[in-house]
Image (spheres, rainbow, N blue to C red):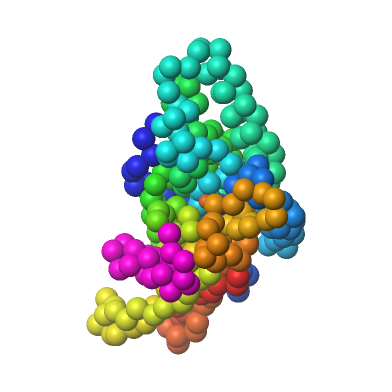
Amino acid sequence: MNENFITSAVYDMVVKKVNAPWLLIPFGDVHYGNPSHASARFQEFLDECEADIKAYQDRVRFIGMGDYFEVYSGSERAIVETHKLHDSTILRRDEVLQREADAFFELIKFMKGRTLGLLEGNHFANFSNLVTTTPYLCEKLECPYLAKETFIKLKWDYSNKKKSLVIHATHGAGGASTPGGSINRVDRMAKVAQADISLMGHDHQRGAWPGVQIYMDTDDQIKEKLIYIGRTGSFLKTRQVGKPSYADPAWPATALGSLKFMMIPRTTAVGKAGRKKLYKFRVELKAVS
Ligand SMILES: [Fe+2]
């Protein structure tokens, strides 16, 4: 299956109560099943997500950034996914992949109905029917497959007052061994694709960086808009005694975990029209981890 395409998704966000925060949790590079998978840290993440759902109820959304469970990279797929295997071997391989994908789904099934979509990473496998393991997970989570790159629009609505928030995300490619090199690549992407939040995974670095764009609004006024660029972290330890590592000795260890953003619908009073109060509606955005 060809995963190299761009997708889009649009969601209606109906606000029942202003000032009640929503959470956006982009997570990826889990590498579940890798000998160096940080299982205790990932369990902590899952517990925190479940606690967030208890606290924020239907106001929690997830985005999958790729590399969910440990399976072949691109060069490995070229070796393993050959047509020269016996039919019985292909069937056995399908069974193993399905078992692995099912085991991973069991861990994240509480995200069902709350996931904006799953991006493709560089670690995935094709079933013999040419569907990759990621759309298989999407079907189980009942969310869209986001492929290589996506734009997601969140359309907020509070008493017919509208506001949109756009996320642009990709798993990413290439590597950077310094914090500057890592975030600069996302910054470059944010200059090419306009969004309120620009996200990339892949190099396992973690951090969200705020920025401000100035623009001329439809009312001819110059305004400022807060944006974020971010690397979404990982749950794969860089080094562990006696375990295989993807990193050479000069490669920096990365801070495990995910990102988390708070989106807070707010109103500001702007005057009165007769006895009717007038207000402006906005969605405040802030990175909380
Ligand atoms: Fe990864």
Residue 265 in view, yes or no: no
Residue 154 in the magenta stretch? The answer is: no
Picture quadrant of residue 46: bottom right
In front of the other: 117 or 278: 117
Find residue 229 and report its horizontal and vertical position in percent. Answer: 44, 69
User: On the picture, is 145 further left or further right than 261?
Assistant: left
Find residue 59 and report its horizontal and vertical position in percent. Answer: 62, 59
- Identify the residue shown where x is 57% and y is 45%: 68
User: On the picture, is 173 further left or further right than 105?
Assistant: left
Residue 198 in view, yes or no: yes
- Identify the residue shown where x is 69% and y is 50%: 242
User: On the picture, is 252 further left or further right than 257?
Assistant: left
Q: Relative to 225, does residue 14 appear above or below in the rendering?
A: above
Image quadrant for the C terminus?
bottom right
What span is colored magenta in the figure?
A: 175-195
Image quadrant for the N terminus?
top left
- Identify the residue shown where x is 39% and y is 47%: 148
- Identify the residue shown where x is 56% and y is 49%: 115
* Residue at the extreme bottom of the image, as rendered: 271
